[in-house]
Amino acid sequence: MAFEGLSERLENSFKKLRAKGKLTEADVKEAMREVRLALLEADVNYKVSKEFTAKVTERAIGADVMESLTPGQMVIKIVNEELTALMGGNESRLAIANHPPTIVMMCGLQGSGKTTHSAKLALKLKKEGHRPLLVACDIYRPAAIKQLQVVGEQVGVPVFEMGTENPVTIAQEAVKFAKDHGNDYVFLDTAGRLHIDEQLMEELQNIRSTVHPHEILLVIDAMTGQDAVNVAKSFNETLGIDGVILTKLDGDTRGGAALSVRAVTGKPIKFVGTGEKLDNLETFHPSRMASRILGMGDVLSFIERAEQSLDEKKAAELERKLAKNKFDLNDLLDQFDQIERMGSIKDTIKMIPGIGSKIKDEDIDEGAFNRFKAIIYSMTKQEREHPDIINPSRKRRIAAGCGMQVEDVNKLLAQFKQMQKMMKQFGGGKGGPKVSKKMRRMMQANPQMAEKMMGKMGGSNPFGF
């Protein structure tokens, strides 16, 4: 995941500060030197990292911090606030036209993920009740139109195309089509190049001046590091972008682009791609990202991901079973399926305060759920509904049926009992990670309570990670 190296370096720097009962100006400056090196290693723009540490230093050597009972924690609080401000402060929403459709022009270099993320964004809006339309304006790249049609079909969004007609004409006709057919969002998937050139920019400017998009979004690949920032700067100066979609933030990128784009271009990151699946797109929240970078977790994103992934009917059914103490292995199987739909287990666990920052990728076994599911599938219906009847001979049969050891069966049954206890404690039996609206409001109003609760949940380690 992005920022992993940066998080580790910052954590080491802050450990030294927390260990001191009283801070001197020299202590703060030494810590900020380490922070600046960590930022540069994470591929953050040099000027951005220098200005960032200067701001933190200026605030941290003030009397309020030096005379505080917990000066180390005060410095971390300042770093968190400045990181949030560096990335834009508040999340930035998509524009909404006064008279539909809202026209969104998607641009970027070839290979940045523009076509895929056009579909991802369309899917996100469709789930919110909108009627988006995808438009194939890339007439140059082989199979570009076909690719958009494929992803459009996968997300259930119509695709408008006119073959190799002039892209400006295609955009004009698509807007007319949207008005006639009630589509309230139009996504123009424009052509890209391997590099920025005059021909590309001229075509994009012609589309912009003809259909007057309400939003111009630049899709950039976070894996390209500082080059991503340079691309954003060039597109903004020539075209005038309104925001950025940063892709591949789930990869091995060092994350510097996310910290530099806003400062260099003045334009916000609006969405981030967090995986290959078409529902792996998240609204970019600067405050939550700052918390994740500093190892504080991201409890609200965890909740949102759970709410989007978990089945309401199954959660209600599970609540009734828990009330009657009838939670069985069939229910555990459903929980595994729903948790897997939340995305990568590694990324999900890293959102949990109190545990995410302490667990390394190599400590997380992504295949654990599949092995547990294989064991449950090897059981009879009676054994799944009444796990207490599983004696040693049944365990041997179950293990042989799924190609595993008796020890693996024992481990699952032990963790099943632990899961039962955890679910009774967390949310009053609301279907595992499912969080009620009332609980969500409490968490938003009191993030400290949320962190403690989620940290306790993560600390129980129900799946053996």
Image: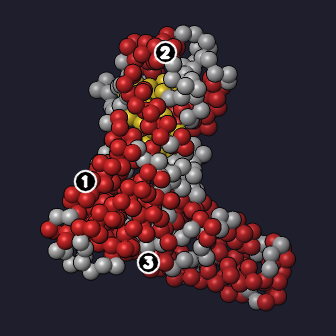
Q: Nearer the viewer, residue 130 or 56?
A: 56
| Residue beneath the point at 42% across and 56% down | 37
Q: Position of residue 450 (x, y in %)?
A: 35, 69
Q: Nearer the viewer, residue 296 or 434?
A: 296
Q: Position of residue 354 (x, y in %)?
A: 43, 73
Q: Around disc 2, counting alpha carbons within 10 Å, would you say few (fewer than 14), some (14 to 19), or many (20 or more)?
A: few
Q: Relative to residue 365, is residue 240 depicted above or below?
A: above
| Residue beneath the point at 31% across and 45% down | 88
Does label 1 or label 3 sit earlier along the sequence? 1
Q: Position of residue 453 (x, y in %)?
A: 39, 74
Q: Which is in the foreground here, disc 2 or disc 3? A: 2
Horizontally, residue 57 falls left or right of residue 7, namely left
| Residue beneath the point at 61% across and 79% down | 416
Q: Residue furthest bottom?
A: 392
- Spatial CA span between label 1 and label 3: 35 Å
Q: Which is in the foreground here, disc 1 or disc 3? A: 1
Q: Around disc 1, counting alpha carbons within 10 Å, would you say few (fewer than 14), some (14 to 19), or many (20 or more)?
A: few
> Residue under circle 3?
456
Q: Quadrant of the C terminus?
A: bottom right
> Tag 1, which secondary structure?
helix
> Residue under circle 2?
198
Q: Around disc 3, counting alpha carbons within 10 Å, would you say few (fewer than 14), some (14 to 19), or many (20 or more)?
A: some
Q: Amino acid at mark 1?
A: Lys
Q: Relative to residue 89, is residue 356 depicted above or below?
A: below
> Residue under circle 1?
55
Q: Relative to residue 49, is residue 353 depicted above or below?
A: below
